[in-house]
Image (cartoon, rainbow, N blue to C red):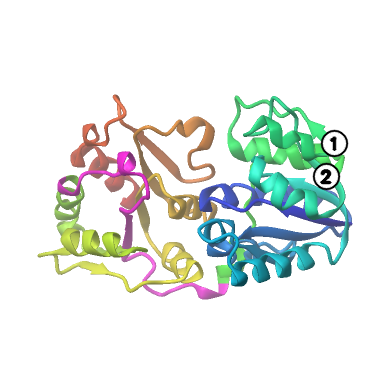
Amino acid sequence: MRILIIKTSSMGDVIQTLPALTDSMLTLPNPRFDWVVEEDFSEIPGWHPAVHKVIPVALRRWRKNWFSHKIRQEREKFKHTVQLNKYDAIIDAQGLIKSAWFITRLAKGIRHGGDFHSAKESLSSLVYDKRHRIHKKQHAVERMRLLFSKSLNYSMPQMDANYAIIDFFSNQASQDSKKNLVFLHATTQKNKHWPEKNWRRLISSMDVNGLNIKLPWGTNDEWQRAKRLAKGFSYVEVLPKLSLEELAHILINSRAVVSVDTGLSHLASALNQPNITLYGPTNHELIGNYGYNQISLCSSDKHMDTLTASMVQKELEKVIR
């Protein structure tokens, strides 16, 4: 059975789709998945054992210069790749008008997605051949699992969500995995940032634990913030710029993670790493980290500075012990 998945972004949404593939892999005889995903996240689907082919798309980059000669050529090449095969099922797990119109409708096969009341953008459902009711008042991981089960006509397994990517990194275990903490301080939305003064207080409180702290970053602003957080602390390392696979290796070899609401935090949860996530405006019950070893600390009034360093320190020391 050959299946095409359309789930292009964001990083967290892509990661939270993985358990649905695991359900399908364990239920159906030899399903073969191709996956259309934004180029920045194209590493992720290939970590799952059920994914045969990853098809990168660049809608975010293309829309900046949609009609240029180079972009038109890239779009035509992408269209050709998507239409190479006829699929037994096409699952639009994105649920947006742009994904439905520019990707899903191009693919050959029976197109599945949420119905008018279930899709993120209701009008995207007009592109689908089969529309499924998926109640929104449940976590995104469970919504994806239910969409896949309805689209591929099987009963959803009665088991906990399994991202099935740990084995990809299992041969990369490090001897010093109990000596490192990872602090994921960077996020794209300003109202999800934890104040730098709080990060530094938390870092300072870790001095007596004999652990090293690693600070990843992705943009220049994040690099500058990481340097400010690390200043004066000999046990804090600002990492070089790394690929997602390299960052996953850092995460899986850590003692624990402290994070704001960001894609890498979802990656930590998919790797079953002990992870304390700090939430402000996010409804973590619907789209927060999901899985084992996950601790959510939620701001009482949606302002991140109400989460104090001592509150986070208390939870982190429990995990370390």
Q: Which residue is mark 2?
A: 111
Q: Amino acid at mark 1?
A: Lys
Three-letter code, disc 2: Arg
Residue 189 highlighted magenta (yes or no): yes
Q: Is residue 172 above or below residue 178?
A: below
- In the image, which residues are magenta? 171-197
Q: Residue 99's spot in the image, x, y percent?
A: 67, 47
Label 1 belongs to which residue? 130
For the question of whether residue 22 can be seen, the reply is no
Q: Is residue 209 left or right of residue 299?
A: left
The disc, 2 or 1, on the residue closer to the chain's N-terminal end is 2
- The crowd level at tag 2 (other Cα within 10 Å; few <14, some 14-19, many 20+) is many
**Was residue 165 drawn as part of the magenta stretch in this picture?**
no
Residue at 56% x, 69% y: name it.
170
> Relative to residue 182, is residue 110 drawn left or right?
right
Q: Which of 275 and 147 lies nearest the eye of the viewer?
A: 147
Residue 128 x, y percent position in the rendering: 80, 39
For the residue labelled by badge 1, is the local secondary structure a helix, a strand or a loop?
strand
Residue 9 in percent (x, y) is at: 57, 51
Asked which quadrant contains residue 122, the reply is top right
Q: CA distance from mark 2 to mark 1?
A: 6 Å
Relative to 51, is 298 above or below?
A: above
Horizontal relation, residue 245 to residue 315: left or right = right
User: Which quadrant of the rendered structure holds the N terminus?
Assistant: bottom right
* Residue under the point 24% across and 35% down: 307
Assess whether mark 1 and mark 2 are in contact (beta carbons under 8 angstroms): yes
Eyeballing the image, is 143 above or below 179? above
Kindly indicate the quadrant of the structure image that contains residue 79. Answer: bottom right
The residue shown at (71%, 29%) is 134
Q: How many marks?
A: 2
